[in-house]
Image: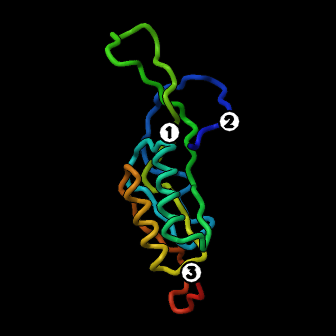
Amino acid sequence: MLQPKRTKFRRQQKGRMKGNAQRGNQLAFGSFGIKTLDSKWITGQQIEAARVAVTRYMQRQGQIWIRIFPDRVLTKKPLDVRMGKGKGNPEGFVAPVTPGRMLIEVEGVSFEIAKEALRLAAQKLPVATKFVVRRDYDFQNTNA
């Protein structure tokens, strides 16, 4: 499961996710990718499930890049505990994403394989996504 090796502080404030993604919103590595349309916290388990779905469908051909990392700590208070008495204990890590953020990129496979693999990955994620293709991708000369 994805999580940071160490953090500066055990607990973090929630913060706000306003607006669209300012960085990480373009294809940088692959020819195909999925881009989020919602603001949401994505857990390490969800990212890992999406990664497994893509690699299984692509059958170890091509290359994938995961463009998000869960580095924000998520805390929870135990069940049946009254309000107050401090913040809860760390439960896991999440990656906050805003609309436009690239989640996964794929290279080295055909358009059809990439589209289906990323569709399977999108089903594992709690956000609505959009399939994107590199602007200079040549559909006629696909050698993959």
Q: How is the image coloured?
A: rainbow
Question: How many discs appear?
Answer: 3
**Helix, strand or loop status at disc 2:** loop
- Label 2, label 3: how far apart the Cα atoms are: 38 Å
- Label 1, label 2: how far apart the Cα atoms are: 14 Å
Q: Measured from the top left, where is residue 134 in percent x and y?
A: 54, 74
Residue type at mark 3 is Asp
Q: Residue at x 59, y 39 (%)?
A: 3
Instruction: Find disc 1 in the rendering and name its residue.
Output: 94
Image depth: mark 1 or mark 2 in front: 2
Q: Residue at x 41, y 59 (%)?
A: 122
Instruction: Find disc 3 in the rendering and name its residue.
Output: 136
Q: Residue at x 56, y 88 (%)?
A: 142
**Helix, strand or loop status at disc 3:** loop
For residue 60, which quarter of the picture?
bottom right
Q: Is residue 115 visible?
A: yes
The 10 Å Cα crowd at callout 1, few under 14, some 14 to 19, many 20 or more, is many
Residue type at mark 2 is Lys
Q: Residue at x 55, y 23 (%)?
A: 11
Q: Measured from the top left, where is residue 21 in percent x and y?
A: 49, 51
**Quarter of the figure with the N terminus:** top right
Image depth: mark 1 or mark 3 in front: 1
Image depth: mark 2 or mark 3 in front: 2
**Quarter of the figure with the C terminus:** bottom right
**Helix, strand or loop status at disc 1:** strand
- Label 1, label 3: how far apart the Cα atoms are: 33 Å
Q: Measured from the top left, where is residue 104 in percent x and y?
A: 53, 60
The one of 25 and 140 positioned closer to us in this rendering: 140
The one of 71 and 136 positioned closer to us in this rendering: 71
For residue 106, which quarter of the picture?
bottom right
